[in-house]
Image (tube, rainbow, N blue to C red):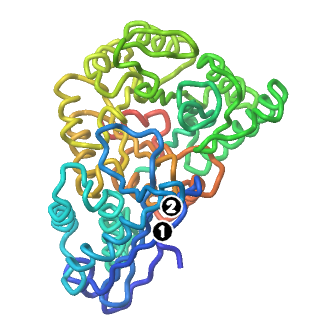
Amino acid sequence: MRRSEAKPSRAAVEAPGSGALVTGLAAREVLDCRGLPTVQVDLELDGAITGTADVPSGRSTGSAEATELRDGGERFGGYGVLGAVANVEGELREALVGRRLPEQRALDAELVALDGTERKSRLGANAILGVSLAAARARAAAAGTPLYRHLSANAHLLPVPLVNLINGGKHASNDLDFQEFIVIPVGAGSMIEALQISTEVNLALAEILLERYGKSALNTGDEGGYAPAISSPQEALGLLHEAVSAAGHDGRFRYGLDCAATHYHDPRTRTYELAGERRDTEAMIELYLELIRDFDVVTIEDPLDEEDFEGFAELTEASGIQIVGDDLFVTDPRRLRTGVERGAANSLLWKVNQIGTLSEALDAAELAHRSGYTVVVSERSGETEDPIIADLAVALGAGQIKTGAPVRGERTAKYNRLLRISEELGETAVYPGDAFEVAVAA
């Protein structure tokens, strides 16, 4: 049975979610898409209903993210998570099993208090988040509703996918410093059409890369995008434009970047080493304005260092496009509040594992919406087949999702879940197309 389709008993439907007795809590190591361990949690209600959730893992991470607990040592190269699993099956199980399941906010607050550290470093954010998400899934199953509907009675807005077709940075073994080169199917009229035309562009891109650079250019990065042996961001964006044209979809796509600039920033000199050239903040901003002008770039994520709120504010004002904070905000309401006060960025990249509980992540999205910021729901590079962010994107009404190329099971699981949600919503479903940037903020 799929984790998103657990069937509740009649008795459970009559007494849904909160108030149900927590009768089991278990965890285990499972493998993410890089073959490294991560945490999977089962939370059982009334001996009959189980919510299951996997915890993703990032490679390109912000320094202020909640702490992912890893075992160290030789086993799995130090990446094991037996300690986090033991914390779920020990302290967290002892705190929850045999009690009525609290409401989500109360549960998450209790989990945070049990850990007792600022970044969840004692029990591990991966242990805490697994319990938080599994509880949300179990509560939805007890109510007999899909998770997106359980979290939002008004859920109807499907997200436009930001489809990462060329990988670089820490997600690939090429010389591209920018991490993601993205196509955005704004000209589609539905989720299935968005995936159709994105796939057609990806197929056309493969042919162009093979002819121009040879077979090695078809190697892929962590998120399924191609990793050709190039170093110029202009060349990568040019390839995307060529592929869109070759696929016959001129005018139906716009373009985006995830620069992950912290990872090639030198804090001593306050410069960036990009494609073998050193640039200061002003030169980086000048580069981005050129890319916006020349390549129809409409969204840029993490264009500058994670502590450069002033530079983010300058680019946000100068660019007129969506400037997304990922490492800048790490889905933390406190850092987002600082960004809002300083005018830094105008969009939040929303990764639930960066903060470590569902409630705290929802608080960050709510603050973003109230502040006129857009929200981009995002996967991590170390993903599993768990499609939960598809439900969360629809529940938030975010209008945007970033979950990689339209290939590989851990990526297509999210896209396929969105297709099912679209079918369930029927005529009430809205695909915002070219309005994706203002779907929430307007």
Residue 299 visible: no
Q: Is residue 240 above or below residue 160?
A: above
Q: Position of residue 30 (x, y in %)?
A: 51, 67
Earlier residue among tags 1 and 2 = 1
Q: What element does badge 1 sit on?
A: strand
Q: Residues within 10 Å of mark 2 (few under 14, many from 20)?
A: many
Q: Residue at x 52, y 15 (%)?
A: 291
Q: Residue furthest front?
A: 73
Residue under numbered circle 2: 37
Q: What element does badge 2 sit on?
A: strand
Query: On residue 406, which mark appears?
Result: none
Say which of 252 and 130 sits in front.
130
Q: Residues within 10 Å of mark 1 (few under 14, many from 20)?
A: some
Q: Is residue 241 left or right of residue 305?
A: right
Q: Is residue 271 above or below residue 417?
A: above
Q: Residue at x 21, y 65 (%)?
A: 111
Residue 93 visible: yes
Q: Quadrant of the C terminus?
A: top left
> In the image, what residue type sits under mark 2?
Pro
Q: Residue at x 18, y 53 (%)?
A: 117
Q: Residue at x 54, y 10 (%)?
A: 277
Residue under numbered circle 1: 29
Say which of 339 and 96 sits in front.
96
Q: Is residue 48 above or below residue 398?
A: below
Q: Position of residue 232 (x, y in %)?
A: 62, 17
> In the image, what residue type sits under mark 1?
Glu
Q: Is residue 376 above or below residue 56?
A: above
Q: Is residue 6 left or right of residue 173?
A: left
> Does the residue at mark 1 contact the one at mark 2 (Cβ under 8 Å)?
yes
